[in-house]
Image (cartoon, rainbow, N blue to C red):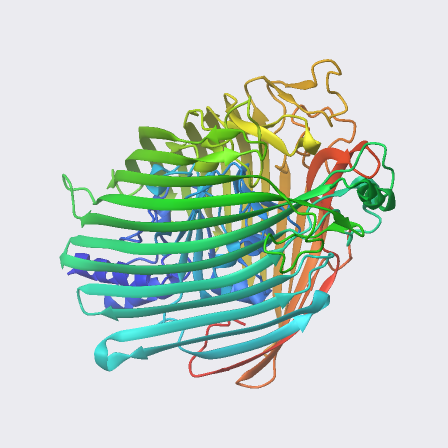
C-alpha cells in the first residue's frame, strides 16, 4: 500500500507541474494519505518527470524556483528571472533586446543568437526546446505566466542528453488543478511598454479532467532606437486522469517580432540610445504540440512518455555597413554614395524548422537485496529537418543608419540600387537517438548511491550551396555522425535530518551544430549569423564534471547550500574571427580543452513577514590549450601576421567571474508587499580579447537594484509596480573589439544596458487563487 501511495503521490506531483517547486503541496498530500510518509522535496532528474527523486538523494546543487516567484517580480521571461535570482547565472545581451539575452550558468551558455556555443539544454514539459539548427534557445517562445516551476540542474548530467555540458533547465507548466480561477492583468510604463496577460484554469471533476489557458500580448518601443518588441504568446493544457493513468495534451503558439541595435563603439556611448546600424530584426513564429502520459502498472512500476511536434519559421534581417577608412563622420559616409558606391548591405534569412520526437521510460520502485531502490530506463528520439535560405542585397546608409531593402521593392529605401550580392541555400536533417538508465540505491538510511548512463547517437546531414555573388559556388554537402556512452556516478550522505553531503562525477557531450559544421573552413570564412560556406568535419565536445557540496538547514526557517565544481571540455569549439570586416567573418574550430572551475553558496530564510535569499557564484572559465586567431582589432595583435596567441589560463570572454544575487520580500501589512533584488556582477572580457591583453581591459563591474510592490485593493483587484535599475546605473553586459567605421579607429564596442524603468499594472482575478501569485 505504501508503494502505491508513493507512486500516486509522485504522479500527482509530476502532473501538477510542481515536483520541485511546490513540494510542500506534494508532501502535504502524502502525509494526509499516509502519516508514515516523511516530508521531502521531489526533484525531476530526467526530462520526463517519472517518480522524481528526493532532494536528499540528488548529488548536485539543484536550484528550484516557482511560477509564483516569476509573477511576484514581474519578470518578462525565463532568462530575465534567472539572471536576477539564480546563483552562478549572469546575462550578456549582444542584441539589446529584452527577449534576446544570453544566459550563462557556470560559464556555459544558452542563447537565441545563431553561432553562440551552447552548453545548456532546456526542456519544457519534457520536450527539448534547443532549436535543431544551432542548438539556440528562444526565450520569447516560453510564456512566463504558464510556468509552474523551474529546476536548474548543474553538471554534465547525461540523462538530459545533448548540450548538457554545464547544466540543464527543466521547466514545468501550470495546470487547471493547481491553478484554478481567472486572472487578467494590464500593465504599462517606460519605453512605451504596454502588455495584457490572462490565464484561466479549472477542473471538470465529473470527467476527471482539468484545463489551463494562458496568453500574453506585449509591446515595447525599446530603450534604444530601433529596438521595439511585439510578443504574442498562447498556451493551453488539457489533462485527463484516473486512478492509474494520466494524459495531458498541450499546445503552445507564438508570433513575435523583436528588433535590436547591437553594439556601440565606446566613443559613441554618450548617446546610449543611438543605433550604430539598423534595423536588425528577427520574427519568430512557433507551434509546439505535445502529448504526455503515464500509467501505473502495479504497485511498483510506472511507464511514462511523450510525443511532440515543433514547427517554427524565423525570419532574420541583419543590417551591415562599412565606410572607407578616410571617412571621419556619418555625414561623409553618406556622402560617399555620390560616386555610385554602396556602403552597406542587408542580409535577409529564413529558417524553417520541423521537429518530431518521442520519449518512453519505465520506472521500477522496489527493494533490491533488502535495500530501497529506484530504477529508471528509457529511450528518446528527436528528428528535425531545417531549410535555411539567406540572401545578401546591396544597400545605402540613410541618415546615420541602414534600412533593409526588400528585393520586391515594396519597402525599398532606394529600389534602384539594391543588387544581389550572394546567399546560402542549405537543408539539414538532424537525428538524435538516446538510450538511458539511472538507478538510486539506498545503502542504508544515511547513504545513497546513484549510477546513470546514456548512449547518444547523433547524425547531421547537410545539403546545399553558398553563392558569393561573383559566380563562385561553395559546396555545403556533408554527412556527420557522433556517438558516445556518457556515465555518471554520485553518492549522498545524510548524517542528520537537516544535513546532506554529496559528491558526483558525470560526463556529457555536444555534437557540432549544423551552423558550426557549415562554417568550419579557414579558407572560406563565413559571416554570422547568416552566411555559411563549407562543411569540414568537427569533433564532438565531451564534458567531464566533478562536483562536491553540502546543503542543510540551520533552523526550520533558514536553509543553505554550498558547492565546488570543476568541468573540463575536450575538443571545445570556438568561433575564430579572421580579422576582416570588423571581425564579423570567421570560422568554427576545435580549440582543445577549456575549463570551468568554481564555487557557489546560497542562503534562504523566512522570518514571519520577511523572506530573504542570497546566492553567490564564482567561476573561473579558462582556455587550457593554446591557439592563435586573427584579431585585427586587438591592441596586442602581431602587426605582421595579424594574429594573437591565446595561452593556457586566459579567461573565456563573456563570462563574469563573480555574481551576487540578493532578494528581500516583506509583507508590510496584510494587503501590501514590497520586494527588492540586488544583482551584482564582476567584469567580463570582450569578444576579440581572448588573450586578455587588449588595452581596454574587461568590461566594468556593475550592481543594480530592482523593486517590486503589490497592493491588494479588494478580493479581486490588485495594483502592482515594478522598477528596474533604480539608481539609473550606466553599465554593459556585452562587449566586442571592432573598428568604428566612422573614425577608422579600433575600439571596444558595447551594448549599453537599459536605464531606469518604471511600470504599473492592475490585476483582476476571481474563482480560486488564480495564477498570478501576487
Q: Quadrant of residue 664?
A: bottom right
Residue 742, image x, y percentages: 82, 39
Is residue 566 visible to us here? yes
**In which quadrant of the rendered image does the C terminus lie?**
bottom right
Task: Say which of 556 and 320 sits in front.
Answer: 320
Q: Residue at x 16, y 45 (%)?
A: 367
Left or right: 187 in relation to 155: right
Residue at point 15%, 42% (across, down): 370
Counting from the top left corner in percent of width and height, residue 117 is at 52, 36
Count of all numbered marks drawn on residues in the image: 0
Horizontal placement of 343 versus 38: left or right? right
Above or below: residue 203 compared with residue 412: below
Where residue 28 sits, quadrant-wise, is: bottom left
Say if 288 sits above or below 450 in the image.
below
| Image coordinates for residue 286, horizontal then vertical, percent | 44, 58
Residue sitting nearer the eye, 121 or 537: 537
Q: Is residue 117 above or below residue 710?
A: above
Q: Is residue 337 left or right of residue 609?
A: right
| Residue 30 makes an appearance in the image | no
Give whichever of 518, 457 is nearer the camera: 518
Q: Residue furthest front?
A: 416
Quarter in which the N terminus is drawn: bottom left
x 68%, y 59%: residue: 706
Task: Give the image location of residue 155, x and y in percent.
Answer: 43, 37
The vertical placement of 295 against 719, above or below, is above
Amino acid at each position: 500500500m505504501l508503494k502505491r501511495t508513493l507512486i500516486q503521490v509522485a504522479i500527482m506531483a509530476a502532473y501538477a507541474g510542481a515536483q520541485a517547486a511546490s513540494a510542500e503541496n506534494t508532501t502535504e498530500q502524502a502525509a494526509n494519505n499516509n502519516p508514515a510518509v516523511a516530508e521531502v522535496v521531489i526533484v525531476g532528474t530526467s526530462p520526463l518527470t517519472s517518480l522524481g527523486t528526493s532532494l536528499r538523494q540528488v548529488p548536485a546543487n539543484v536550484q528550484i524556483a516557482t511560477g509564483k516567484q516569476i509573477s511576484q517580480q514581474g519578470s518578462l521571461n525565463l532568462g530575465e528571472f534567472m539572471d536576477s535570482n539564480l546563483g552562478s547565472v549572469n546575462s550578456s545581451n549582444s542584441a539589446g533586446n529584452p527577449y534576446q539575452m544570453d544566459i550563462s550558468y557556470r560559464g556555459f551558455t544558452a542563447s537565441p543568437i545563431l553561432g553562440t556555443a551552447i552548453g545548456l539544454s532546456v526542456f519544457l514539459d519534457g520536450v527539448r526546446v534547443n532549436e535543431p539548427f544551432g542548438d539556440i534557445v528562444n526565450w520569447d517562445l516560453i510564456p512566463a505566466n504558464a510556468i509552474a516551476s523551474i529546476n536548474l540542474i548543474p553538471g554534465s548530467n547525461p540523462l538530459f542528453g545533448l548540450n548538457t555540458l554545464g547544466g540543464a533547465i527543466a521547466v514545468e507548466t501550470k495546470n487547471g488543478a493547481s491553478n484554478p480561477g481567472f486572472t487578467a492583468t494590464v500593465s504599462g510604463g517606460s519605453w512605451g511598454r504596454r502588455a495584457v496577460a490572462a490565464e484561466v484554469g479549472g477542473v471538470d471533476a465529473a470527467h476527471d479532467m482539468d484545463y489551463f489557458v494562458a496568453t500574453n500580448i506585449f509591446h515595447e518601443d525599446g530603450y534604444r532606437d530601433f529596438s521595439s518588441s511585439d510578443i504574442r504568446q498562447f498556451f493551453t493544457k488539457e489533462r485527463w486522469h484516473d486512478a492509474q493513468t494520466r494524459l495531458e495534451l498541450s499546445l503552445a503558439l507564438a508570433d513575435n517580432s523583436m528588433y535590436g541595435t547591437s553594439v556601440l563603439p565606446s566613443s559613441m556611448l554618450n548617446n546610449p540610445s543611438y543605433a550604430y546600424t539598423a534595423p536588425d530584426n528577427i520574427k519568430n513564429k512557433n507551434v509546439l504540440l505535445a502529448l504526455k502520459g503515464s500509467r501505473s502498472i502495479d504497485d511498483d512500476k510506472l511507464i511514462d512518455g511523450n510525443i511532440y511536434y515543433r514547427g517554427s519559421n524565423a525570419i532574420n534581417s541583419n543590417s551591415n555597413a562599412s565606410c572607407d577608412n578616410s571617412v571621419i563622420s556619418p555625414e561623409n559616409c553618406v556622402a560617399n554614395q555620390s560616386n555610385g558606391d554602396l556602403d552597406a548591405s542587408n542580409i535577409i534569412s529564413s529558417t524553417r524548422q520541423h521537429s518530431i520526437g518521442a520519449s518512453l521510460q519505465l520506472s521500477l520502485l522496489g527493494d533490491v537485496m533488502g535495500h530501497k531502490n529506484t530504477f529508471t530506463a528509457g529511450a528518446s528520439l528527436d528528428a528535425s529537418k531545417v531549410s535555411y535560405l539567406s540572401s545578401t542585397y546591396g544597400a545605402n546608409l540613410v541618415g546615420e543608419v541602414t534600412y533593409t531593402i526588400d528585393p520586391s521593392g515594396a519597402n525599398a529605401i532606394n529600389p534602384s540600387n539594391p543588387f544581389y550580392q550572394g546567399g546560402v541555400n542549405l537543408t539539414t536533417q538532424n537525428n538524435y537517438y538516446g538510450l538511458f538508465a539511472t538507478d538510486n540505491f539506498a545503502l542504508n538510511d544515511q547513504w545513497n548511491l546513484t549510477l546513470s548512463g546514456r548512449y547518444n547517437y547523433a547524425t547531421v546531414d547537410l545539403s546545399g550551396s553558398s553563392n558569393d555573388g561573383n559566380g563562385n559556388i561553395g559546396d555545403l554537402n556533408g554527412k556527420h555522425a557522433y556517438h558516445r556512452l556518457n556515465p555518471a556516478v554520485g553518492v549522498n550522505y545524510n548524517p542528520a535530518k537537516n544535513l546532506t553531503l554529496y559528491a558526483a562525477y558525470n560526463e556529457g557531450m555536444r555534437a557540432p551544430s549544423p551552423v558550426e559544421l557549415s562554417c568550419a573552413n579557414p579558407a572560406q570564412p563565413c559571416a554570422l549569423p547568416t552566411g555559411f560556406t563549407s562543411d569540414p568535419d568537427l569533433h564532438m565536445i565531451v564534458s567531464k564534471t566533478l562536483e562536491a557540496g553540502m546543503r542543510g538547514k540551520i533552523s526550520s526557517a533558514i536553509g543553505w547550500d554550498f558547492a565546488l565544481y570543476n568541468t573540463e571540455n575536450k575538443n571545445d569549439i570556438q568561433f575564430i574571427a579572421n580579422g576582416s570586416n570588423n571581425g564579423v567573418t570567421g570560422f568554427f574550430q576545435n580549440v582543445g580543452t577549456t575549463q570551468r572551475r568554481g564555487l557557489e553558496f546560497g542562503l534562504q530564510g523566512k522570518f514571519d513577514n520577511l523572506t530573504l535569499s542570497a546566492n553567490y557564484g564564482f567561476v573561473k572559465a579558462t582556455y587550457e590549450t593554446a591557439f592563435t586567431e586573427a584579431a585585427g582589432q586587438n591592441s596586442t595583435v602581431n602587426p605582421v601576421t595579424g594574429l594573437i596567441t591565446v595561452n593556457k589560463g586566459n579567461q573565456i570572454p563573456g563570462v563574469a567571474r563573480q555574481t551576487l544575487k540578493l532578494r528581500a520580500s516583506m509583507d508590510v501589512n496584510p494587503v501590501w508587499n514590497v520586494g527588492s533584488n540586488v544583482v551584482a556582477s564582476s567584469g567580463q572580457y570582450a569578444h576579440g580579447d581572448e588573450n586578455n591583453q587588449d588595452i581596454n581591459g574587461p568590461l566594468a563591474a556593475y550592481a543594480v537594484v530592482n523593486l517590486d510592490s503589490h497592493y491588494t485593493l479588494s478580493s479581486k483587484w490588485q495594483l502592482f509596480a515594478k522598477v528596474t535599475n533604480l539608481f539609473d546605473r550606466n553599465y554593459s553586459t556585452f562587449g566586442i573589439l571592432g573598428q568604428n567605421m566612422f573614425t577608422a579607429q579600433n575600439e571596444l564596442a558595447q551594448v549599453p544596458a537599459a536605464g531606469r524603468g518604471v511600470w504599473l499594472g492592475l490585476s483582476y482575478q476571481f474563482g480560486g487563487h488564480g495564477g498570478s501569485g501576487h
